[in-house]
Image: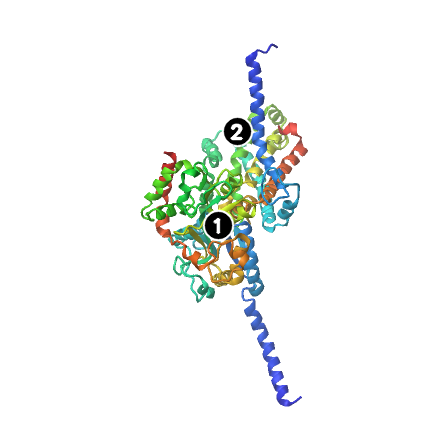
Amino acid sequence: MRYDFTDYVLIVAGAVTRVAVYALLALPAALVVVLSFTSGETMDFPPAGFSMQWYQKAFESEPFMSALWTSTYVAVIVAIAALVIGFAAAFAINRFDFPGKGLLQALAFSPLIVPAVVLGIGLLYLFAWMNLIQTMFPLFAGHLVLAIPYVVRTVLASLTLHNRVLEEAAMNLRASPLRVVRRITLPLILPGLLSAAIFAFVTSFGNVTVSVFLTYGGNVTLPVQLFTYLDHSYNPLVAAVSSIMIFVTLAVILTIERLIGAETLS
Amino acid sequence: MKRRTFLKLATATTMSTLAAPYVHAQEKKFAGITLRFGGWGGLYDETIQKYVAAPLEERTGLKVQITAGTQSADLVKLVANKENPPFDVYQADSAYMVEALKADLIQEVTEAEVPNIKRILPGFREYGEYGVPYSVFTYIPIYNSELVEQPLTTYTDLTRPDLEGRVALPAATFDTWSLYLLALAEENGGSISNMEPAYSLLEQAKSNILALAQSTVAMIQMFETKEASAGVISDARGHELRTKGHPIVSVYPPQGIYGATSYMNVVKNAKHPEAAFAFLDQMLSDEGMLGLPRALRLGVTTDVKLPDEIAKDLTFNTPERIALKKKVDWQKWMADRSARIERINKILRG
């Protein structure tokens, strides 16, 4: 294959763009992680030296650790619930024609088009009206509302792309619809389901805007704790806590990757 | 032992035995009660926990549950749950007090309920019987002495031509932080009802503005990276920059210093108003009052005696400095908020 000058320019431009995009995506997080190991008292770059003191302080901080626990268990429960609800919705949208299908689809994606602040205030008033505000339920429900669109979109794409021949063969062999879903559909779209679960987890784990309205009774999430901390203090503890958030998210993704393999997930 | 001595001793022992449970009950009169406090997070909450909540718990058995949040989100939570509020004590600065009062969320607090109110300095209680002021913060001009040759002495100095492209100011959406605008107006013959002098000065000195900070962190970073040579920031943050080794000088303009006050409020329909009063009283005690100055160098609102090493870092550390504290008509300031933001945006876009 012959390359002319234009091809070379495009190849180089493509490579430069890729590097720039990857750098832009990874550098902020990498910078935060690097700063979290500073031995200095300020978030100066380059760091003054290497130290784990800010991690020690982060792990000793009761507000941060209880917030980390709250964020983690809320995100895990939300990911599981969003997966169940999102799969059901995506399956219905993909497989069946029924009155109101367009409305269901629009509703499933609507949280994406409503600004998160407005959604947070709306949910606050809704749960206040239901007299449920002084429980953990609004936080779960708020995060669930945010996560469902991502799950529906991802699962819907998996369902649309996967070949239905195996499902039809199973049904020809008299497998019940539930058995077909359980033994054929779910295993075939497993990578999509797990990607959706990761989306849901990350959406819930990193949310501030909705959480700040729905937390109650000391159950503050880590991003809200971090956000309020920044209002009065600005030191490498912020970088250490942010890095812990990054590590937790990475741990979730890597665990899933170890369970099913990166190739399958991609 | 004589009969009389024996009777005296026996009576005293009996009385003590009978009175002990009562005294103990008085000491731990809030045992089993949890007070819900809307916190502001981080070091702020840690300080209140250490100097207010912990001593109070030891003395009265009261547990304090601090939920970190923002005053705007907490206000919305209270408005949405008026009958069953999620907090017993709500914190608000001078600007948010206007909103809290408008929404009828807080109750009056008098000296009868919180005896330490009598120790509040004159002029620090801006809303009559509403709100207990516990901390004061100012927004003053600061400059980097290595980068600015001629020292600043007033808010108006921020518009000097030699500071072109080097001044960092807050976004107009910050209600208390943008008090520098009122300062610009009043230093130049204007008033809260006539902000034109401030606007025309800003228009003329538009090229001085490096950026309008959307957060305190962004503002601090501009000074840390030396992008900004001068600006307006809270006195506590100016001190923080100095402790990090930056040559930042705080300016105390002789015409007046602008700032706001933080208040604690007992929420209407609070579950435990008595416990909330005790909490407020502990906040105003010497022990409670010295916590925030120690940790964050925030100003005090009572006649508490400040240790010298803290006093030297505070804005209002002498009667003369306190006399410079400008009174702000917060109702008017907040009523003009939208128009002010619109005007600033128009000036800076133009």
Is residue A183 among the parts visible in the rendering? Answer: yes
Residue B11 at x, y percent in the picture: 60, 83
Compared with A64, B24 (above or below) is: below
- Residues at discs 1 and 2 both on one chain: no
- Chain containing the residue with disc 1: B
Label 2: how many Cα within 10 Å (few below 14, some 14–19, many 20+): some
From the viewer's side, name the closer residue of A169 and A49. A49
Q: Which residue is mark 2?
A: A94
- Front tag of 1 and 2: 1
The quadrant of the rendering that contains the C terminus of chain B is top left
Marks 1 and 2 close (CB-CB < 8 Å): no
**Quadrant assignment for the N terminus of chain B:** bottom right
**Amino acid type at image mark 1:** Asp
Q: In the figure, residue B125 lies in which quadrant?
A: bottom left
Q: Is residue B256 left or right of residue A249?
A: left
- Residue A239 picture quarter: top right
Q: Which residue is at 53% across, 34% downward? A: A150
Viewer-proximal residue among A41 and B322? B322
Q: Amino acid at mark 2?
A: Asn
Which of A266 and A183 lies nearest the eye of the viewer? A266
- Can you give x and y, in whole percent of width and height, for residue B110 in the image? 42, 64
Q: Of all residues shown, which one is farthest toward the bottom?
A: B3
Circle 1 packing at 10 Å, graded few (<14), some (14-19), many (20+), is many
Name the outermost residue toward the top: A2
From the top left corner, tell me how far across and down residue A139 is, in percent. 52, 45
**x, y percent for residue A42:** 58, 43
Mark 2, secondary structure of its residue: helix
Measured in 3D between alpha carbons, the distance from the residue under mark 1 to the one under mark 2, in whole angstroms, is 60 Å
| Up/down of A95 relative to B125, above or below | above
Tell me if residue A197 comes above or below residue B49 in the rendering. Answer: above
State the residue position of label 1: B235
